[in-house]
Structure formats: structure tokens, C-alpha cells
Image (tube, rainbow, N blue to C red):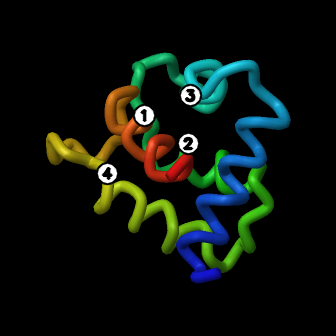
């Protein structure tokens, strides 16, 4: 399993075990209720998914780079759904 697969797997486990739906997870981690996840909010999600502290900053940056389609350096609900869809594949 690659590092990316391992990280996505941990995120899936977190969402599956602690939230009724991916949208509930998104809303939980969207601390400022702006309907977008900032890098800080993504780091919190990664921490809760038990991603190593050293990797959190790197992974949050890579997640934003990989899934931020509109270039605002945030992950909105549609972009989050795309990431979740990749996890489920």
C-alpha cells in the first residue's frame, strides 16, 4: 500500500467510524462554517485520522493541490466529495 493509499484509507476509517455521512464529517471539520476546509481544518481532520504529525502539513498541502479545482486554496464540499469518491474506489 502506498503512502497515499494508506492516508486515504485512514481518512475513510475516520469518516466511516465517527460520522453518519461524509457530509456530516465535512460539516464537523468546517469549524468556521464557511462551507470550505482550510489547510488548518484539513490538518485537524488528518490528526483525528491518526496521520503522523510530521506528515500532516505536507499531506494537507498535497490534498489541497490535488483536489482544489477552483484555485482558492480551500476544499469545498464538491471537492471533498471528489476526494471521498477516490477513497471509495
Question: Disc 3 designates what residue?
Answer: 26
Query: Quadrant location of residue 7?
Result: bottom right
Q: CA distance from mark 4 to mark 1?
A: 10 Å
Question: Disc 1 designates what residue?
Answer: 81
Q: Who is closer to the viewer here, 27 or 23?
A: 23
Q: Earlier in the sequence, mark 1 or mark 3?
A: 3
Callout 4 environment at 10 Å: few (<14), some (14 to 19), or many (20+)?
some
Q: CA distance from mark 3 to mark 2?
A: 10 Å
Q: CA distance from mark 2 to mark 4?
A: 15 Å
In the rendered image, residue 40, in percent from the top left (x then y), is placed at 53, 48
Residue at image point 50% right, 52% down: 89
Q: CA distance from mark 2 to mark 1?
A: 16 Å
Query: Quadrant location of residue 41?
Result: top right
Q: Earlier in the sequence, mark 3 or mark 2?
A: 3
Callout 1 environment at 10 Å: few (<14), some (14 to 19), or many (20+)?
some
Secondary structure state at the residue bearing disc 3: helix
Secondary structure state at the residue bearing disc 1: helix
Q: CA distance from mark 1 to mark 3?
A: 9 Å
Amino acid at each position: 500500500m502506498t503512502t497515499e493509499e494508506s492516508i486515504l484509507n485512514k481518512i475513510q476509517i475516520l469518516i466511516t467510524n465517527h460520522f453518519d455521512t461524509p457530509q456530516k464529517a465535512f460539516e464537523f471539520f468546517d469549524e468556521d462554517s464557511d462551507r470550505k476546509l482550510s489547510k488548518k481544518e484539513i490538518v485537524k481532520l488528518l490528526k483525528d485520522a491518526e496521520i503522523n504529525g510530521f506528515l500532516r502539513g505536507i499531506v494537507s498541502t498535497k490534498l489541497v493541490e490535488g483536489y482544489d479545482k477552483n484555485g482558492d486554496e480551500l476544499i469545498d464540499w464538491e471537492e471533498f466529495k471528489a476526494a471521498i469518491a477516490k477513497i471509495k474506489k
